[in-house]
Amino acid sequence: MAAPTLQQPSFLLVNLKADSITKPLLQRCQDLVKIIDEYPAKELRVVFPWLVETVFGSLDGIISGWNLRLLHSRSNEYNVVVEFLNPSGPMMKLVYKLQAEEYKYEIPVNYLPGPVKVCIHEGVLPECPLFHNKLQLPLSGLTLNLALNPFEFFMFHFASCLITPKSYPQDPHGSSTDSAYFVLVDTYLKYFLPCEGSVPPSPFSDSRGSVTAPSPRSSGVSFAGYGVHSPSLLKHHIFHQPSVNADPAAQEIWRSETLLQMFVEIWLHHYSLEMYQKLQSPQVKLALLQYRLSMSSQPFAPPGSGTAHTYQEPFSPTEEHVLVVRLLVKHLHAFSNSLKPETLSSSSPPAHSHTHTSPLEEFKRVVVQRFVQQKLYLFLQHCFGHWPLDASFRAVLETWLSYIQPWRYTEESTTPQPDPNRTVPDKWESFVQENLLMYTKLFQVLLNRAVRTDLVNARNALMVFRVAKVFAQPNLAEMIQKGEQLFLEPEHVLHQRQPRGYLTPSQGGSFLSSRQRVVTDMVFRVKGHVYALEGQDCQYKQMFGCELRGAVMKLIQIIAQARQTAKRISDHSSEVSANNSFLSWFGMGTSELNNTFSGAEPEESGECLKKTHEFLDRALENLCQIFKLNQGQLAQLISNLSSSQDDGNNKQLPDCIQGENGPILTDLGRKQIISGLRRFDIQYQGDPELQPIRSYENALLVRMFYRISSLLNERFGGHMNALCSRPDLLGRLGRHYLSDLDSSARKLKLSPTWRRSSERSRGARLSLRPLASYRTLLLLLLLYGLGAALSLGPVSSTLLLLTGGLLYGLLVALCGDKLKAH
């Protein structure tokens, strides 16, 4: 991060720092464009590290820079910033200008990803060639630095801008995919990893005629070593690495390699301590032990040596981080699928036969498997295991689904209306086999998440449906099954099957021996993939085995329970909405003041619940298709579950035990409430007259009518009880107009507290609270207005209303029992 050592202060840098405080961003960019064009590289080399930090922020997060992640298209500065940082814009022109002079800029090793930092501190050469031949022993002996060229330095800060914690608040109105940073990532990927054509050359050249990378890969290294644990070196060897000879053919794509390696290392190369220890190969562990033994006999050890530096990296990717990774995955698939057919058909011979293949075409052939696969697998595995159980997991899920469906990013898939039931082409069988764990292991981890997720929520149900839909694509399950069979092929069978010499049919061989060779190569490829990601001692669980089949049946049962819960909530919501209709507003519906379902959230009502039911139904169909489940058994399972839930309200309650004062929740009951599978039927059990004043009631009238009704109940309570206890017509008429607490208490399962309090307040009571409702007042006003229009006075209208009310009460008293029985 520090600039090269300066002998004299730069007046240009001082002026730019002063302008950054006083001038607006638009004017500063215009000044920078002129300075980059007019000043020589010798003057600009001092400005460059300060400018990079000003734009992207400091690596420690203290300086926020231009806040590219918060800069959206609606901002006035958006277009200025995007144009300035464009791959062919002024900032990149400055990079190429300094690149031609081969200047170096230092980055502290402490800002590297955790695994790379630990490798360097413990004397092991990092597997990524991007960090080879760049380590410098500090003069002060305190910190290690990495010497990067201007292009690497720029891309390191640009990539780190995404994961560096910032102190500014997130914009609630802006989308991550609309930010300037997201747009620039997409632009850089399309420019340096083009699907058509080649990478545009640099506008500047050095004395040798081309802008070269400081440590290009040699022709002997090629791409074969990337993504595989390299042989370790002692720290002494790291500081004294010999320089490699430049490969002229590699100069065409060194910027593409650098950009991709920087993105992959900074964004994906993070995982837990257990995973770090698991990934260390036996060769690495042996070299590390030898190094520590040799260092223990020396009086001086370089800083960072020994076991003092343990791997501790708290890694919590954000949703924005995952969305950018998905953008990278999608573009890499499109980039790899743009490989020419003749190059693709010749990709099976050994590497030395690619003499007529351009470096860019060779890069397309290996970019996904050797540059991204391992680190993306570990990244997704970490996210699957640590992401919260909410709908924000959709970003991680879609990133995974994008990677395991490379056929979506071909020229054939760009049709306006692709067929959803299109069969996965057979040419992708090798991709599925070489990425077997991406399909099987991550599916198993997702299965464990799904059974702990609230599937009543429509967004969570959509995620389960998305996964089932992807894996239900025709021919995909068969490809995965074949890959598992290849991995489980015993070693001794391979040696027996492998012929002594491979002869073509024209040389006297048979087609059978040629096919055996192909199968053997496929077996070794699948085994190598699994062992590289999970280690030699991994315990592989088959995706279509008995154990996982049981887990799938458990998920199906939970899906069925969620369907029933969603249906029950939807039916209850429909009843509530019907009761709150226009006629109910005028008092012709239910008179209960608490007829709302308190357990439903906004996402769990109305159309969302209908979508939940649809998503879960289609997910069940797809799961049956994937695992060849019997439709009859599935229907029986769902019907049994439905009937068991309809056997009474007690069976719909959460699991609980009976205590001294009523039911007590168990751990299972708490999980059922959290997951939304079961809920208590919560209703108000206190004195109806003392309920909180509602928004549709007049507070003054509620209090006034309560005092009047309390006075009447105290004076005539005995007469009311006697009237309601009569079995004749007058008794039924009194029970209709007077509130009978005994009958309402028998309908509810009262709590222990209400049982004790209700014993003191039982009996018939007069309630005038309905008259304080605004809808009742408006209805009376309309009726009196209608009476005035018919030339009826207030007294006549009142008598008519009382007569109508009495007749309605007589009708209910006479026919109420028959209507209830019907």
Image (spheres, rainbow, N blue to C red):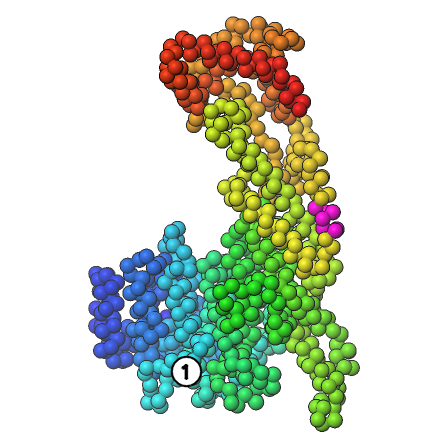
Magenta stretch: includes residue 557? no
Q: Main secondary structure of the magenta part?
A: helix
Q: Nearer the viewer, residue 447 or 811?
A: 811
Q: Camera-side residue: 750 or 121?
A: 750
- Residue at position x 62%, y 58% in the image: 468
Q: Quadrant of residue 67?
A: bottom left
Tell me which corner region of the image, top left, top right, bottom left or bottom right, holds residue 185: bottom left
Q: Position of residue 146 (x, y in %)?
A: 42, 75
For the image shown, how many numbered marks are present on the structure?
1
617 versus 741 height, above or below: below
Magenta extent: 632-638
In the image: residue 451, left or right of residue 322: right
**Position of residue 449 in the picture relative to residue 327 (left or right):** right
**What x and y, as percent, mark residue 59?**
39, 65
Quarter of the picture holding the C terminus: top right
| Front one among 164 and 544 | 544
Residue 719 shows up from this direction: yes
Residue 298: x and y in percent read: 53, 77
Q: For the N terminus, which image quadrant?
A: bottom left
List x then y, in percent, for residue 119: 52, 72
Mark 1: which secondary structure?
Answer: loop
Q: Amino acid at mark 1?
A: Ala
Q: Which residue is mark 1?
A: 213
